[in-house]
Image (cartoon, grey):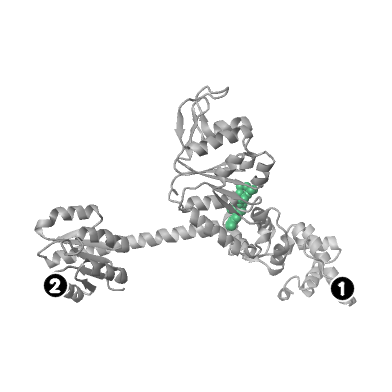
Amino acid sequence: MMAAKILIIDDENLFREDLAKLLCRRGYDCKTAVDGNMGLAVAEEFDPDIILCDIVMPDLSGIELLGEILRICPESFVIMITAYGTIDTAIEAFRKGASDYIIKPLILEDVLQKIERLLEHKCLSDEIRFLRRQLHREVECSLLVGQSEQMQKVRELVRKVSTTTSTVLITGASGTGKELVARAIHENSTTTEEPFVAINCAGIPEHLLESELFGHTKGAFTGADNEREGFFELAGNGTILLDEIAEMPQALQSKLLRVVEERKFIRVGAKKSIAVKARFMASTNKNLEELVRSGQFREDLYFRLAVFEIHVPSLKERRDDIALLCEHLLKNLNRKLKRNCHGVDNEAIRMLLSYSWPGNVRELRNVIERAMILATGEFITPAELPSQIAGSVEFPKYSDDLRTAVAAYEKEHIRRVLLAAGGNKEECSRRLGINPSTLYRKMADLGMISNNSS
Ligand SMILES: Nc1ncnc2c1ncn2[C@@H]1O[C@H](COP(=O)(O)OP(=O)(O)OP(=O)(O)O)[C@@H](O)[C@H]1O
Ligand SMILES: [Mg+2]
């Protein structure tokens, strides 16, 4: 382990150098500075674990210095050195972030003990900080998979906007991961522990949506037997995602506009307004600008929501991510389905890569899940892919050579029948009207399965 680094800032030469010598002898890596300005310069360069800092010095006062030091080295611990007359200042120093103080003349054992204690403490807090960072990184990665340039850009925007409380509009085709982006922003924000509430504006009947959002008083309408909180209250200081915002009825759009503008709302049937503390996000797979132009969506609401827009690209625009997503999905699904599927074989991957993915990542997830259920081996093969994907690969151009052309046709035919038979080779051979052993031999000859079993 590296020696702990200690910086001593004191204008009293003898005291400073003696103490430094003693600490060096005890195995610490020690540096000294004769005044505040030099202290700052050394601190910046040296990044000490612990700083011993005199309170009374000619240029900068120890208190001013303390503030500067903690700004430069926020992770250092500062021990103030005081004389009897400066105890009050020491108390002020504590308030400003000093960790401890020692009184001149020093009792060496006392100093060493304080240093040891702080180092232990620092070790722990470094570890906690490290673990927290790891955790965050993991959350971030496990949430938004993809190394394509487009996904990296999305992640960059997520990182940037999560340090703010700006309203975010997330756009993109269905199944691209819009809700996941919203969650990633929430997970990276400072209010992670607060609720993340997603409301599907398309999934709630129009007459109920308002009371779902705002809550209602007892007897506000028939059926309102009790007072109830709406989603805006449930979200607390967290995040509200208005999913499928384009489907919000016009009347409610005006009410929502007021909430976004004034940051307060009124429960259905109530008079008193309630403040909204949560952050707003909205998502849609529609082109809101177009809806604004055609008068279906309020322009003022659109501007309020689109403060910061993140567009999630379709899967076919970032095919580089398909293999990585498969790996990620397999890992998750292995856990869920209690399987041990190792991957997708080369041919199947080629098919997945050339498919158009109208349902984007959600469709990919469904395809992988279905394939894993069908798969009998350790790898997903073309036989387990649905016909629109397995069939979408271009039929190989027949060669003029008869044998090559027949082989190509045979291969394609077997693949289709195998697919129709749900990947069951016995059933496939029955449908083809040949023996299972003949089918195996053919498949091996055609390079559809490996040869070593025969
Ligand atoms: N980049 C990604 N990494 C990992 N999983 C993803 C990614 N993008 C999407 N998914 C997964 O795909 C599925 C669909 O994602 P999500 O629900 O966020 O999409 P959406 O854009 O909100 O879809 P819709 O428009 O239909 O509401 C989820 O299971 C999600 O976990
Ligand atoms: Mg969604």
Residue at 89%, 77% in the rendered image: 401
Q: Element at badge 1?
A: helix
Q: Where is residue 125 in the image (x, y as percent from the top left)?
A: 32, 60
Q: In this rendering, would 125 be left or right of 365?
A: left
Q: Against 176, is 401 above or below?
A: below
Q: Residue at position x 31%, y 60% from top?
A: 71
Q: Name the residue under label 1.
A: 405
Where does the image place residue 64, in percent across and percent down from the top left? 23, 58
Does the residue tagged 1 have its C-beta within 8 Å of any atom of ligand 1? no
Question: Which dot, 2 or 1, sits closer to the camera?
Answer: 2
Q: SS for tag 2? A: helix
Q: Inspect the image, locate mark 1, and give the three-letter code of the amino acid beneath it.
A: Ala
Tell which residue pokes out farthest to the bottom in this image.
Answer: 401
Q: Local crowd at mark 2 within 10 Å, few (<14), some, or many (≥20)?
A: few
Q: Which of 170 and 219 is in front in this view?
A: 170
Regarding residue 35, the answer to whether it shows in the image is yes
Pointer 1 local density, CA inside 10 Å: few below 14, some 14–19, many at least 20: some
The picture quadrant where one finds residue 79 is bottom left
Residue furthest to the front in view is 59
| Residue 74 in view (yes/no) | no
Q: Which residue is drawn at 21% across and 72% down?
A: 32
What's the residue type where badge 2 is placed?
A: Asn
Contact (Cβ within 8 Å) of mark 2 with mark 1: no
Is 8 situated left or right of 393 in this image? left
Residue that numbered label 2 is attached to: 13
